[in-house]
């Protein structure tokens, strides 16, 4: 018996009030270098996949304990969204292009089933990216279990998730959502509280 | 009667007859946009839903600056759909009755307050106005003037349909017809007079500026 609705949340800048890659980069002093790559990606000069692999290459020798400590210390969640998730954890999913190896402590705090990009490891050493998550695939994999899928995101890499979902919400609670993504959305909200009011009514 | 918790503002249309190349909710009357005036009179509303289409980026930026908890409902098909279909994009999810109004409407606040008070006594309520416009839809009222019996394009009846109404989500259908045509199936419906009219043409806009300057005739 399929459950009624699944809610797929982007992580960076949607569930979290901070973008995680800049936090990860600054924890090892590479914020300028990572910012250049992030800019190039946002402005369409570099595809997300290539940019992400480059960013992982730059950060792969960073001490993961520092990264995890920085994320645990600095990442904040919206309390309304946390309350919404806590009421229906089996229907809520994190869909992030970020690397499982890095964002593990953030995901553990959220306690939700997650779809992430997957690190290639050599023992306990990060080598590169084994698989970059295509967010549309994550949504498709939920199809047999759910009748309807609601996607919530803010960035260009959420576009495939929106294309595969039934209802799409562009979230501007942290920063203005990507213009292309907004054009694909059914709703635009600018506060976590408003997002949850909307989700509760859908 | 359940309290009124939802307001749907329709602001998707192009407003081609006004010819300003500007979404009508961005038009200013005495230094304030129509959208700002609506947001100010709806502070009581728990949920404000704003349907956007034409010039949506500008409209979204404005509403974000006025009231960030407004939920924006997109109608990307605004050029090919009408107000009823704009409303349907959100009414299909609403749990109960709601207030609907067009963003291009000028409203006298005192009569709007009386309309809201009357809506506590009636499950549905249709706003009618003595202020008539060149191509407005008029309402046929019963003898006591408290029930809408019909709508007409015939410019004879005294009261115009304002587009302001408290209605049930079931009354809204996803069909290419006007809002008043969807309401016809539920007539008779209670009527309430308020001072309001929509701005479709430059003469309507002139009337809006004159009327707000004179505070709806009080300062003439």
Image: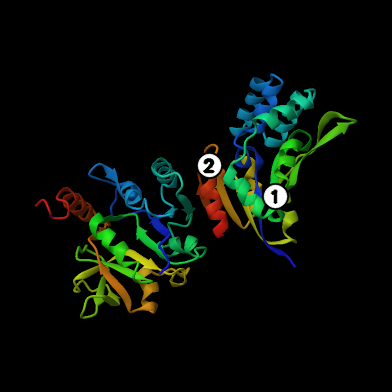
Picture residue at 43% right of the left edge, 45% below the top: B60
| Residue linked to disc 1 | A93
Q: Nearer the viewer, residue A169 or B165?
A: B165
Assess disc 1: are there few (<14), some (14-19) or many (≥20) residues with their C-alpha within 10 Å of its C-alpha: many
Quarter of the picture containing the C terminus of chain A is: bottom right
Residue A39, horizontal then vertical, whole percent: 60, 28
Could you tell me if residue B190 is visible in this image? yes
Q: Residue sitting at 46 percent across and 47 percent down?
A: B69
Q: Residue at x 67, y 35 (%)?
A: A47
Position of A136 compared to B207: left or right? Answer: right
Looking at the picture, how far across and down is residue A160, in whole percent? Answer: 66, 48
Q: Is residue B61 left or right of residue A86?
A: left
Q: Is residue B63 above or below residue B160?
A: above
Looking at the rendering, which quadrant does residue B11 occupy? bottom left
- Tell me the quadrant of the picture where the N terminus of chain A can be found: bottom right
In the drawing, what numbered circle is on residue B201? Answer: none
Looking at the image, residue A197 lies above or below residue A122: below
Secondary element at image label 1 = strand
Bin the neighbour count of mark 2 within 10 Å (Cα to Cα): few under 14, some 14-19, many 20 and up: many
**Residue wearing tag 2:** A172
Q: Tell me residue A144's x, y (percent).
A: 75, 61
Going by the picture, which residue comes out furthest to the right? A123
Q: Is residue B82 above or below residue A20?
A: below
Give how far across and how far down residue B185 sits, in percent.
Answer: 39, 78
């Amino acid at each position: 018996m399929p459950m009624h609705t699944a809610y797929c949340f982007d992580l960076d800048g949607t569930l979290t009030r901070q973008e995680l890659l800049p936090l990860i980069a600054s924890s090892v002093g590479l914020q300028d270098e990572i910012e250049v790559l992030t800019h190039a990606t946002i402005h369409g000069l570099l595809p997300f996949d290539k940019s992400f692999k480059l960013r992982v290459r730059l950060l792969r020798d960073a001490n993961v304990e520092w990264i995890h400590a920085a994320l645990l210390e600095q990442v904040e969640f919206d309390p309304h969204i946390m309350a919404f998730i806590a009421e229906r954890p089996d229907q809520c999913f994190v869909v992030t292009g970020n690397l499982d190896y890095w964002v593990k402590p953030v995901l553990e705090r959220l306690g939700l089933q997650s779809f992430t990009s997957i690190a290639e490891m050599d023992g306990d050493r990060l080598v590169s990216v084994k698989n970059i998550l295509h967010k549309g695939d994550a949504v498709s994999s939920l199809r047999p279990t759910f009748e309807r899928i609601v996607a919530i995101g803010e960035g260009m890499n959420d576009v495939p998730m929106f294309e595969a979902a039934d209802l799409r919400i562009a979230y501007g609670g942290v920063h203005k959502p990507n213009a292309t993504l907004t054009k694909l959305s059914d709703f635009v909200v600018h506060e976590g509280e408003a997002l949850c009011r909307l989700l509760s009514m859908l | 009667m359940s309290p009124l918790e939802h307001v749907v503002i329709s602001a998707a249309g192009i407003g081609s007859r006004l010819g300003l190349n500007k979404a009508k909710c961005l038009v200013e009357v005495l230094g304030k946009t129509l959208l700002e005036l609506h947001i100010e009179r709806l502070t009581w509303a728990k949920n404000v839903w704003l349907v956007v289409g034409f010039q949506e980026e500008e409209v979204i930026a404005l509403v974000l600056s006025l009231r960030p908890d407004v939920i924006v409902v997109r109608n990307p098909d605004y050029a090919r759909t009408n107000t009823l279909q704009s409303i349907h994009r959100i009414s299909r999810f609403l749990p109960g009755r709601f207030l609907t109004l067009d963003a291009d409407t000028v409203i006298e606040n005192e009569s709007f307050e009386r309309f809201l008070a009357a809506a506590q006594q009636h499950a549905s309520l249709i706003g009618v106005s003595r202020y008539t416009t060149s191509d407005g839809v008029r309402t046929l009222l019963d003898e006591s003037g408290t029930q809408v019996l019909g709508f007409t394009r015939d410019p004879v009846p005294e009261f115009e349909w304002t587009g302001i109404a408290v209605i049930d989500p079931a009354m809204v259908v996803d069909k290419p017809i006007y809002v008043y045509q969807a309401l016809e199936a539920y007539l008779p419906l209670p009527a309430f007079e308020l001072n309001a009219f929509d701005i479709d043409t430059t003469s309507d806009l002139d009337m809006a500026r004159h009327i707000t300057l004179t505070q709806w005739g009080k300062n003439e």
